[in-house]
Image (cartoon, helix red, strand yellow):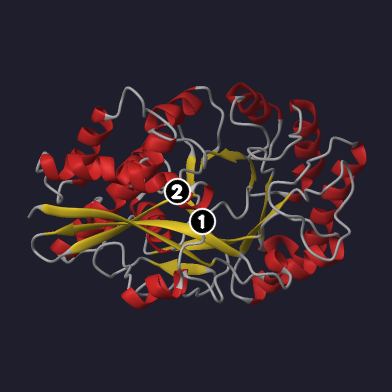
Amino acid sequence: MKVTDLKTILITAPWTGDPFWVQGTEFVRTAALIRVETDEGLDGLGETVMGYFCPEVVPPLVDYYRSLLVDLRLDPLQPERVYDELYQRSLWWGRVGLAVSVLSGVEMALWDLAGKAASKPVHALLGGAAHARLPLYASGGTGTWPVEKTVEQAQLYIGLGFRALKLGTGFTDRPGGLWTGNVPPPYGTWHAGTTGDRIEDERAKFAGLRATLGQGVELAIDGHAVQVREPWSRRTALDLARAIEEFDLLFYEEPLRYDDPAGYAELRRLTRVPIAGGECLTGEAEFAQWLQMGALDYVQPDATHVGGVGPCRRVAAMAEEHHAGLIVHTGGAVGPGFMANLHVAFASPNARYVEYALAPNNIREELLIDPPRLVDGMLEAPTAPGLGVTLLPETIAAYPFRPGNIEYA
């Protein structure tokens, strides 16, 4: 089998219908899908999270990798070998970051192709399913609401079958206090604040959640420190962690910026709340550094960014060696990206949960062969060949690409 083409398909489509995310506004995102085509008529579909952040830069890089795939006649049924070759040939300028993120979508498409060719789901190609079922947690967005509305949000997720949920730290357009507007603040304008009142706000939210939901529901918090304009200091992050320890949280995600792994390690030593992170890390070497420093209780790689399916699985194995759990990040993914992370989770013994953003009126529903169906908060291992995704011509036509960045402008 030979690769005949590698194409970028940019679409701008509805991303979530969660009423606590959108509040009556259209919530759309651009996705960068990558399709590999072969001389035998089979194809594979991948995705890079760069479609979400800077879609216009994806096609030139895909074209670069296309020329290598075709000219070198690399075997498309050997995705790990292809990844190693393409990574090596971009090593000087693309060890981490954008190049690895786009290469993730290329590699992912090859795994989809290999699974289809073998008539097996991708997790079977990774060594087989380590779990019959895995729990999903509801990803609750920015967490901008006061206590009463936060409880309503949690009750929505529980009513849909989730037994775990994650909320943000309530970013606002002003330091301290909760958001008081009728709609959430736009992404990219969040401010974490640094006041004692702010920590009490967060403690009150989790106290209200525990009082309403009891101990039978797992709760987690997301600091979103990677992108807020005023991230918390180590001191404030620790004060918050200690303020919510009594509520037995599943994890505290991204409490600090990613340029401070030592701060993560310090926070982990000084609090009982498990520390999670990694969605923004690319390549195995970055995760190796963090794990060697003892910075994480849970790694959160994303196959759309870390290098693809193979690197994501290897990060999970590395985490297991360091006694860390796996909770894959899927927050920016549509169809192929979500499924790639799901297959990695099912193939990884240390997988604990899978992130899930609600998908009513979501492009994801049109791309998945078997959309997720929760039973008792759990999801069964995928059975469709490859990743279990499809992309019809009418889907591409229905969601034309809108140039420019939508959320982070």
Residue 370 point in image, percent of width and height: 37, 75
**Does residue 58 appear to the left or right of 154 in the view shown?**
left
Name the N-terminal-most of marks 1 and 2: 2
Quarter of the image with the N terminus in it = bottom left
Residue at 40 percent across and 41 percent down: it is: 101
**Vertical placement of residue 230 versus 402, above or below:** above
Residue 272 seen in this snapshot: yes
Residue 202 point in image, percent of width and height: 82, 48
**Does residue 169 appear to the left or right of 373 in the view shown?**
right
What type is the residue that disc 1 sits on?
Pro
Disc 2: CA contacts within 10 A as few (<14), some (14-19) or many (>=20): some
**Does residue 176 appear to the left or right of 218 in the view shown?**
right
Task: Tally the numbered discs.
Answer: 2
Which of the 4 image quarters holds residue 197?
top right
Residue located farthest toward the right when viewing the structure as drawn: 197
Q: Which mark is residue 56?
A: 2
**Vertical placement of residue 321 versus 143, above or below:** above
Helix, strand, or loop for circle 2?
helix
**Vertical placement of residue 172 versus 314, above or below:** below
Helix, strand, or loop for circle 1?
loop
Dots 1 and 2: beta carbons under 8 Å?
yes
Residue 343 point in image, percent of width and height: 35, 57
Residue located farthest toward the front when viewing the structure as drawn: 403
Disc 1: CA contacts within 10 A as few (<14), some (14-19) or many (>=20): few
**Does residue 191 appear to the left or right of 82 in the view shown?**
right
| 109, 210: nearer the viewer | 109
What type is the residue that disc 2 sits on?
Glu
Residue at 83 percent across and 48 percent down: it is: 173
Kindly report the distance in space between the C-alpha atoms of the residues bearing marks 1 and 2.
7 Å
| 213, 356: nearer the viewer | 356
Q: Which mark is residue 403?
A: 1
Residue 136 point in image, percent of width and height: 52, 62
